[in-house]
Amino acid sequence: MTTAEPGARGPVRVHWFLPTSGDGREVIGWVHSSIATDDPRAVGRAPDIGYLAAVAQAAERFGFESVLTPTGTWCEDAWVVTAALTQLTSRLKFIVAFRPDSVAPTLAAQMAATYQRVSGGRLLLNVVNGGDDEEQRRFGDWLEHDRRYARTDEFLSILRGAWSGTAHDHEGEYYRVAGATVGRVPDPLPEIFLGGASQAAAEVSARHADVHLAWGEPPPALAEQLAPVRKLAADAGREVRYGVRLHVIARDTAAEAWAEADRLLAAMDPQAIAVAQERFSRSVSVGQRRMASLHGGRTDRLEIYPNVWAGFGLLRRHAGTALVGSHEQVAERIEEYHALGVDHFILSGQPHLEEAYRVGEGVLPLLRRRGLI
C-alpha cells in the first residue's frame, strides 16, 4: 500500500455519473459517439429523461452523494437536465459541469444562485477548462491550453466575487466587469470542482477550487500528480480537497469482474482503438496524454496496478481507468486512494444503472463498515 499523505483526511464521499450522451453495455469511444449521436442504437440507451431519472434515483437510493453531469457537444445540457431531475429526487446533489468559454461569469453566478434556491441547496460545480481543441473551437474558443486556465482564473475570481455579498469589480486580460453581484447569495455556496494534470491547472486549483479532480492513475502516480497542488494551496493558506474520477466493475467475485472486463475488451474494434489512440496522442490535454501512456494502445498490459484496469482508455476520452474486482477488492482500492488524501470518488460503470446497483449494494456497505463513510 502506498504511503499516506500527512494531515487529517475527511470521510470518503462517493459520487456517481449521469450518462447524458447515452448508455449501454459496451465502451463507446469518441469515434462512435461523434458519428452517430442521434441514433439510440449507437449507445444502446438514449439519454431521455426517464432513463436519466432512473440512474439518478438509483444513486439517491443507495446513498451516493451526487451525480456528475458532463458537458460537451454529445451530451444533453447539464444545467437543463439536472434542473429537471431535482424535481424527481429529494436529496441527491448534482455536479454540473460547464466550461467558462460558454457562459459569462456573472451569469454563471446568477444561475448557480437560482439553482440553489430551486433545488434546496443541491448544486455542485465542475469547472471544465477544456482539453480538446476541436471541441473548444466548435463553441468559438480559440485560446491555447495555458491561456484557457488563465481565463478560468479570472472567471472564478469574478464568480466568487459575485457571491461575496458585495459588488465586485474586475479588470483583467479576459474579463472586465463592474459591480458583479447576485440578488441573493446562494446558500450554501456551491463547492467548486476543478481538474487538470498540468502546472497551470495546479495553480488555478490552489487559488480557487474546493476540490481538485484527477483521472484515475495508479496510487503512486496519483500522489505525485497531486503533490504540486497540495504545496501551492498550502503556500496560499488554503485547504483543497482531492477527488478522483474512475470507472468501476464490481462483482461478487474477482473472476466475475475480470470476465466482464474481458467481455468489454473483446467488443472493442481494433481499428477504432487505433484511430482513438492517434487522436489522443495529439491532445493538448496533459491528463489525456497521461491516460494514453498507461497502456500505449496495447491490449495485453491493461492491469496497470492491482485492480486498476486501463481498458476504458483504449476508446474513451478523459477518464480511462476502472477499478475491477470483487466488492471487497474495490473497497480496498478506494481505501488506498483515500490514504493518499483523496476524499471524493466519482464513479461510473457500463451500464450506469445496473452498475450503480452493484456498487450501491456491494461496495458502499463495505465502506460504511470500515468507517470511511
Image (cartoon, rainbow, N blue to C red):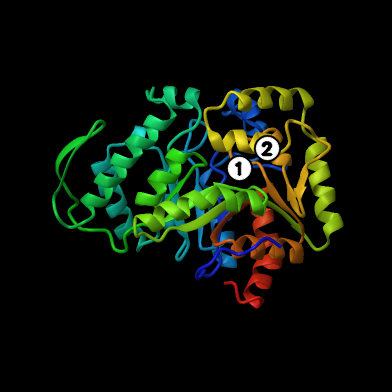
The quarter of the displayed image where residue 123 is located: bottom left
Q: Amino acid at mark 2?
A: Gly
Count residues near mark 2 (Cα–Cα under 10 Å), then give few for <14, some for 14-19, many for 20+: many
Checking the image for residue 319, the label placed there is: 1
Q: SS class of the residue under badge 1?
A: loop
Q: Is residue 154 above or below residue 66?
A: above
In the image, taking residue 97 as reference, residue 50 lies left or right, namely right
Q: Secondary structure at mark 2?
A: helix
Identify the residue at image location x=59%, y=53%. Answer: 223
With respect to residue 113, does 24 lie above or below? above
Provide the residue designation for mark 2: 313
Image-quadrant location for residue 270: top right
Examine the image and state in which quarter residue 268 appears.
top right
Residue 172, percent from left and from top: 22, 35
Quarter of the picture holding the C terminus: bottom right
Q: Residue at x 44, y 41 (%)?
A: 201
Determine if residue 368 is in view.
Answer: yes
Front one among 205 and 192: 205
Calculate the distance from the C-alpha at mark 1 to the C-alpha at mark 2.
7 Å
> Can residue 77 be seen by looking at this rendering?
no
Q: Do the numbered discs 1 and 2 sit on residues whose CB atoms are within 8 Å?
A: yes
